[in-house]
Amino acid sequence: DAKTTQPPSMDCAEGRAANLPCNHSTISGNEYVYWYRQIHSQGPQYIIHGLKNNETNEMASLIITEDRKSSTLILPHATLRDTAVYYCIVRGNTNAGKSTFGDGTTLTVKP
Amino acid sequence: EAGVTQFPSHSVIEKGQTVTLRCDPISGHDNLYWYRRVMGKEIKFLLHFVKESKQDESGMPNNRFLAERTGGTYSTLKVQPAELEDSGVYFCASSQLDLTGELFFGEGSRLTVL
């Protein structure tokens, strides 16, 4: 798997957009970028994933650079409930469950 | 629709004892995965079932761990005998199609070995 690098922590004001970066400079052509988050001690929750095009769903947007070496997860209007550890994972499409979660970014949304 | 459920939510046992963790995946999900987080470390893959078959068990730490998925429905993860370093949170996840990689996780089973 390609290794990912994320900042250990970030703060965001409630109601503002949260932009979480991830570097994955060794990503290969058939590997996807996945984002999960873990709120407190709950199980990880899937957010979004993409290959090379930008993606958007009801939770977030994913912006992948043209060279695919980095990406940004965007929570458009962060709420206090979005405080969590966010994991960026790069994985091939097959056997994608064998993911290494790394240390992630602890996002703290402040009132 | 019920999500992935795990039992027990918390188990406290003595070193040398046996513990069995259970995972009920989302109905219809052929893929089932076990992960664990030991204290202060990252979430790590243990193994992957496709229906009742072990697809990949490369993450299993040693032969004290035994996972089964008889009938391709629920799965059990048995630790026998448990050691102190086995303490942590064990997560189960399931997915309908491995292709998308979207995993649905349970709340985890916290294991404390004294």
Image (cartoon, coloured by chain):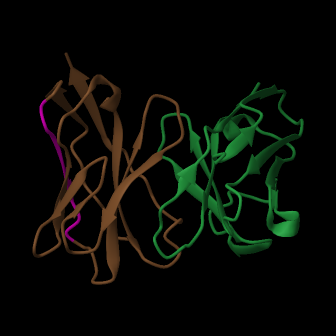
Q: Position of residue A76 (x, y in %)?
A: 17, 41
Q: Quadrant of residue B66?
A: bottom right
Residue found at x 31% / y 32% = A82
Q: Is residue B66 above or below residue B100?
A: above
User: Color of chain B here?
Assistant: green
Q: Position of residue B87 (x, y in %)?
A: 67, 35
Q: Position of residue B114 (x, y in %)?
A: 77, 24
Compare residues A47 and B91 and report the one nearer the observer: A47
Q: Residue furthest bottom?
A: A29
Q: Which residues are magenta?
A: A16-25
Q: Position of residue B99 (x, y in %)?
A: 49, 76
Compare residues B100 and B76 and report the one nearer the observer: B100
Q: Is residue A55 magenta?
A: no
Residue found at x 46% / y 46% = A45
Magenta span main SS: strand
Q: Quadrant of residue B27?
A: bottom right
Q: Is residue B22 above or below residue A22?
A: above
Q: Is residue B42 above or below residue B9?
A: below
Residue found at x 21% / y 75% = A52
User: Color of chain A here?
Assistant: brown
Left or right: B42, with A106 as reference point: right
Residue found at x 29% / y 23% = A80
Number of numbered callouts drawn: 0
Q: Is residue B73 above or below residue A108?
A: below
Q: Is residue A24 magenta?
A: yes
Compare residues A22 and A26 and report the one nearer the observer: A22
